[in-house]
Amino acid sequence: MERPYADWPTDDSADVLNSCDMDKTSLLSFAVPVLLPLSVALAAPVAPSPRPVVAKPAAKSPGTKPSEPVRKPEPPKSACSPMDSGFVMQPIEVSLKCDESWEKCESDIPLRAKNCTGEFQSVYRLEMYENGRRSLELEFDPAPVVGNGTTWKEMIPWTTQGDLEAVVFFRPPGSSGEQSVRGSIKIANKGLTSAKAACEQCNGVWGRYGVNRIQGCNCKTTDAGKVCNDGDDCQGLCLFRRYDDQAREEGVCSEQQRMTGCISIVMKGQSQLKPRIPPPKKLPTCLD
């Protein structure tokens, strides 16, 4: 049989109360640290919210141009005019290049023939005429095929000046017919022409001189008859005449730059040599 509450022992009641007091103290000690930061947070001023960062537009690189709209390529224009028909060749002028002796002269002739027939053609032969006489013939095998509006090209080496005529033969591929076109060619030697013109300006004579018979000009001198003691004193030669009172060689300048035959001349650098006493007999020098 249970006892009433009043009958509980006094010391047990005290234990219970003490236990309750201890729990209140523990709870308070736990709540105080939690409430304290909350009160501090409420008392602190509210920090302003940061402004949103606005991105700046990217800087344009120097020299960058805005992209242009893509244009469609224009169709190629016809290489032939309405007045052109068959093959068309334009006159050609070529200048030879020569060495210092004007002997070895050569150049390439750039032959061009434009196809304006309206269909494909094959070029199968070339003939070159010099002064009305055929001097070159070339057969092309296989024959190059040239489309309408395009140009047939060939480089022909040449060594002599003059007026030429080129004849180009063509026909449709697989055909046995024969058609041709003619073109005039002028081969000039501008270097040689200029040299001969300069020879006329100095009242000279153009010809072949020396042992090797090299082409050149023999100009007249402007100091002809001037007294000289050295070959360097004259435009041409210093022609020996006598020894002067100091035993030096003395002469006069020649009328032309070149001379042939056996002649007594004062050599270049002679004035730098010590005179010989008595002076020796002057021997001639043979020139060609």
Image (spheres, rainbow, N blue to C red):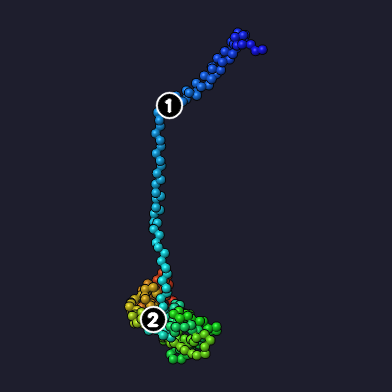
Q: Which residue is mark 2?
A: 81
Q: Nearer the viewer, residue 243 or 173?
A: 173
* Closest to the observer, 252 or 162: 162
Name which residue lies at 52% across and 19% down.
28
Residue 151 in sight in this render: no
- Farthest front residue? 1
Relative image position of residue 84 (x, y in whole percent)? 40, 84
Closer to the camera: disc 1 or disc 2? Answer: 1
Depth order, front residue of 207/61: 61
For label 2, count other residues whose C-alpha is less than 10 Å away and answer few (under 14), some (14-19) or many (20+).
few
Please state which of residues 190 and 152 is positioned toward the viewer in this rendering: 152
Pick whichever of labels 1 and 2 is earlier in the sequence. Answer: 1
Q: Residue furthest bottom?
A: 132
Viewport quadrant of the N terminus:
top right
Please tell me which residue is depicted at 41% across the width and 66% down the height of the picture: 71
Task: Measure how far apart labels 1 and 2 are at the Cα level.
Answer: 96 Å
Whether residue 53 is visible? yes
116 relative to 269, above or below? below
Q: Secondary structure at mark 2?
A: loop
Give the image quarter of residue 47.
top left
- Choose top left, top right, bottom left or bottom right for residue 66: bottom left
Quadrant for residue 141, please give it: bottom right
- Per the image, the residue denoted by label 1 is 42
The local crowd at label 1, few if under 14, some if 14 to 19, many if 20 or more residues have their Cα within 10 Å, is few
Q: Are marks 1 and 2 in contact (CB under 8 Å)?
A: no
125 sits to left or right of 8? left
Label 1: element kind: helix
Amino acid beneath label 2? Ser
Q: Is residue 23 left or right of residue 267?
A: right
What is the three-letter code of the residue carrying label 1?
A: Leu
Residue at 49% across, 87% down: 171
